[in-house]
Image (tube, rainbow, N blue to C red):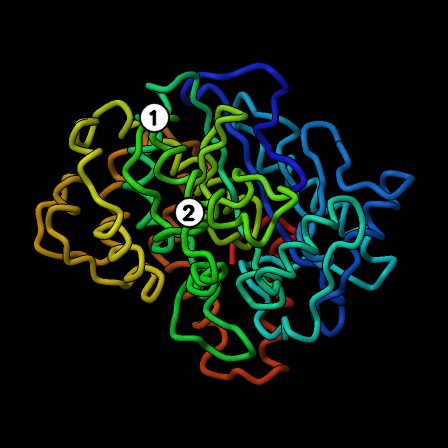
Amino acid sequence: MTGNAMNSKEKRYALFEVTGVELEYMIVDADTLDVKPLCDAIMKEVAGEMASEYENGGIAWSNELVNHVLELKTNGPAISLKGLSSSFFENVQAINRLLSKHKAVLMPTGAHPWMDPFTETVLWPHENNEIYALYNRIFDCRGHGWSNLQSTHINLPFGNDAEFGRLHAAIRLLLPLLPAIAASTPLLDGRPTGFSDSRLETYRFNQRKIPSIAGQIIPEAVFSEAEYHRVIFNPIIKDIRPYDEAGVLSHHFLNSRGAIARFDRGAVEIRLLDIQESSKADLAIVELIVAVLQNMVGGRFISYCQQQEWPEELLFDILQANIVGGEKALIANRSYLQMWGLDKPSATGSELWKHIFGQVKEVLSEESRAVIEHILEEGTLSTRILNALEGDFSRANLRQVYGRLSGVLNNNELF
């Protein structure tokens, strides 16, 4: 809530002209791996005073809702994804050097595996605290879907209403598949949840007190700014009013769908991705998603008119299957598979991603191709974490595996 990787002052960009990327990491004790609310201490140390944002060249650091999470993001929109993995990696190492003085370290994945959000949550206590405090009063931000989640956000620009419509149509159709490539949260409360993407399963119930805020996670089939305001923003503004009479909360921030339109910045932000084990892995998935969306917007799979026809209910059913099963989930909607050019009555998420990857891999960097091949061969990070645990969910074994993950993050490797 402290800014956006596409915040570009007055300038607006055309489709795929730039990309904004945001990566959220949790701060944990270096020995116990318990969450450690040190974001404000690190921000004060690096900025020389208390600050909610610090610019470090092409990457900016900022706080999030809770004080044990620190966000890294492109400092404004990036013209190219080339080299971004290394830039994020250098900043991860810089933060870890600062954290080492506090006997702390950054840890990846989309949720802490044993954090108790009802006893360990510490909200960000400084700038924008009135917003966080109001959120807390309305929704109680101590749950897993609030105070225990880390994600990767992709911000993609649009230059006008027509470009927004095409971008939004393509993103809606790709959202259901994201857990089948990016799920990294098989555990909560120290045990398997039965969901490959536990972060998304909890996230979708965050604001059930006001259902219009998150909708069905998949955004409604709207393809212009006026339609978006009528169908999505206006109900949110109406429904929040009894809880926010002073109008503190912006409708842009309140909108919690899996992709949100920021008409104030000329961008759509994709929010459904669990963060991975390293910036190398995250940026490879970002590059893959951007390539797929470029092909979709260009009409490679189905036409724009056909893309507009998909209701959010059908897309949500596919999303929910992938939240549960990740890459192993069975997608039995033949029309959805045919849309991607896979003429089968059913396919797993992995089979569909292998097919889609085959359509776009030539435009990916060599490093990103290798990362995606690793994921498609070895499984999502959720699957790899469960395989590494080998059925032993003792705290000692969890610390051993997640300690390895922290090392992988600090070396920009793959798990």
In what element is the residue under mark 1? loop
Q: Which residue, as the protein is rendered here, is positioned at the far right?
A: 48
Occupied quadrant, residue 104: bottom right
Look at discs 1 and 2 and give the one toward the viewer: 1
Occupied quadrant, residue 8: top right
Question: Is 123 drawn above or below residue 262 in the view shown?
Answer: below
Residue at point 62% right, 32% down? 74
For this rendering, which residue is in front, 49 or 221?
221
Instruction: Look at mark 2 in the image and give the residue it sits on.
Output: 258
Q: Residue 337: x and y, percent?
A: 16, 47
For this rendering, which residue is in front, 130 or 331?
130
Q: Residue 188: x and y, percent?
A: 52, 73
Q: Amino acid at mark 2?
A: Gly
Image disc number at residue 224: 1
Residue at point 43% right, 22% down? 158
Q: Is residue 100 left or right of residue 236?
A: right
For this rendering, which residue is in front, 346 or 129?
129
Residue at point 56% right, 63% down? 111
Residue 184 shows in the view: no
Occupied quadrant, residue 307: top left
Q: Is residue 334 left or right of residue 177?
A: left
Marks 1/2: CA distance?
18 Å
